[in-house]
């Protein structure tokens, strides 16, 4: 393994590196869907200015240039614990300059910054890798990173042939769990990492177990009446999407948080609570978000939650949650519910739907893949050695 020295980045080096970083970030963000190149460029500039207000001397940020035998070969940007959660540092960007690639420098840079973090007592490190970057993903797996969450999406204009079924338009459904994980700031070139500025794990739409009190803003969810909609479902297993009461909402949310804690061991109940209400600040009355039950054969078989827009991605809806109760799984209800949501969102002019899948939820991942949701990004984390 080559010996790499990391040195604090100077203002001049930052100025030189900043513009290519922002430009590349905008390109990969726009390619992921839900925004134009111009919108992605504006977002990239805004998020970079917010995260690095003082350039390489910004509080809580480590920016290092990488040197080998007196030559600058790349750089790395890491956020200390605090911005994305206690105890979790995050690799926002890592770049090996083109002429120095395929020499093992990316691995050496990461291992060197890990040693620095271990010395300062940081217990965990994470990063984001864009969906099509298999080279980077294999490197991170080799270094011990594990997938915590994936984001997947599909264009809604490419739905399969539909089978008519009565479905109340405007009702939520979803595939896996989670909310978009924020927007990557760092943009990997060569070894793309890209990093979420918001939340590195799925944002649960629920109330954590142990947090007292009723669900904030819970009211009867007003849902439109059933209409005929083209929804592809398995033969013999059509679904309808129905309204949800406050009591049912409370029960479903508490159950959801329990499952979130199991899926994401690093997420505390309090973190789940705080992040959940970013998506549902007014409970069932939150604008542009629908929450309801999945009904099949006159029985409630699950529940769903989805939104008609995603923060910073006006052209993308988001499937926050789909949960089919255990007794009703394996009957095609999940697939039918997802197609119902797709049809509803398409009726509002939403061009793309995104979902998040917990890294260990292989069933949700298989469902998403089967329904045509392609990988756009995934977050990976690892434990660091105790000093």
Image (cartoon, rainbow, N blue to C red):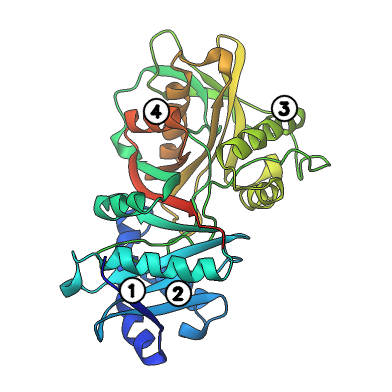
> Looking at the image, do the residues carrying marks 2 and 3 touch, with CB atoms under 8 Å apart?
no
Q: How far is the residue under mark 4 from the one under mark 2?
A: 35 Å
Instruction: Using the numbered discs, state the Cα–Cα distance from disc 2 to disc 1 in whole angstroms.
Output: 9 Å
Outermost residue, bottom direction? Answer: 12
In 3D space, how far apart are the residues under numbered discs 3 and 1 (Cα atoms)?
Answer: 46 Å
Which-is-in-front pick, marks 2 and 3?
A: 2
Residue at far front of view: 387
User: Mark 3 highlights which residue?
Assistant: 248
- Label annotation for residue 48: 2
Q: Nearer the viewer, mark 3 or mark 1?
A: 1
Q: Is residue 324 above or below residue 108?
A: above
The residue positioned 35% from the left and 87% from the top of the image is 13
Q: Earlier in the sequence, mark 1 or mark 4?
A: 1
Look at mark 1 in the image and give the residue it sits on: 21
N-term-proximal mark, 4 vs 3:
3
Q: Which residue is label 4 attached to?
A: 367
Where residue 45 sits in the image (x, y, percent)? Answer: 42, 75
Relative depth, front residue between 173 and 165: 173
CB of mark 2 within 8 Å of CB of mark 1? yes
Q: Is residue 349 visible?
A: no
Q: Secondary structure at mark 1?
A: helix
Identify the image quadrant of the C terminus. Answer: bottom right
Gap between marks 1 and 4 measured at Cα? 35 Å
- Asked whether disc 4 touches disc 2, contact meaning CB atoms under 8 Å apart, the reply is no
Of all residues, the one furthest to the left in this rendering is 99
């Amino acid at each position: 393994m080559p010996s790499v020295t990391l040195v604090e980045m100077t203002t001049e080096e930052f100025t030189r590196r900043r513009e290519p970083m922002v430009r590349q970030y905008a390109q990969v963000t726009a390619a992921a869907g839900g925004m134009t190149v111009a919108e992605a460029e504006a977002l990239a500039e805004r998020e970079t200015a917010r995260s690095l207000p003082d350039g390489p001397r910004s509080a809580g940020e480590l920016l290092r240039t990488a040197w080998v035998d007196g030559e600058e070969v790349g750089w790395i940007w890491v956020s200390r614990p605090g911005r994305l959660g206690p105890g979790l540092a995050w690799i926002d960007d890592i770049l090996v300059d083109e002429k120095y690639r395929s020499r093992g420098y990316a691995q050496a840079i990461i291992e060197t910054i890990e040693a620095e973090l271990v010395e300062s007592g940081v217990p965990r490190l994470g990063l984001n890798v864009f969906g099509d970057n298999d080279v980077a993903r294999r490197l991170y797996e080799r270094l011990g990173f594990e997938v915590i969450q994936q984001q997947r999406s599909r264009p809604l204009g490419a739905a399969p042939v539909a089978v008519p079924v009565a479905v109340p338009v405007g009702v939520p459904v979803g595939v896996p769990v989670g909310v978009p994980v924020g927007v990557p700031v760092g943009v990997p070139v060569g070894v793309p990492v890209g990093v979420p500025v918001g939340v590195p794990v799925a944002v649960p739409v629920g109330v954590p177990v142990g947090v007292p009190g009723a669900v904030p803003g819970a009211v009867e969810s007003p849902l439109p009446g059933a209409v005929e909609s083209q929804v592809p479902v398995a033969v013999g297993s059509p679904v309808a999407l129905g309204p949800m009461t406050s009591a049912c909402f409370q029960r479903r949310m508490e159950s959801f948080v329990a499952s979130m804690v199991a899926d994401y061991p690093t997420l505390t109940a309090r973190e789940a609570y705080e992040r959940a209400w970013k998506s549902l600040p007014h409970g069932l009355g939150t604008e542009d978000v629908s929450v309801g039950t999945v009904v099949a054969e006159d029985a409630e078989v699950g529940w769903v939650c989805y939104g008609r827009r995603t923060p910073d991605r006006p052209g993308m809806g988001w499937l926050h949650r789909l949960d089919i109760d255990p007794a009703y799984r394996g009957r095609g209800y999940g697939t039918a519910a997802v197609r119902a949501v797709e049809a509803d969102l398409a009726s509002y002019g939403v061009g793309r739907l995104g979902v998040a899948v917990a890294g260990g939820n292989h069933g949700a991942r298989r469902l998403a893949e089967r329904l045509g949701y392609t990988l756009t990004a995934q977050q990976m984390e690892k434990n660091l050695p105790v000093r």
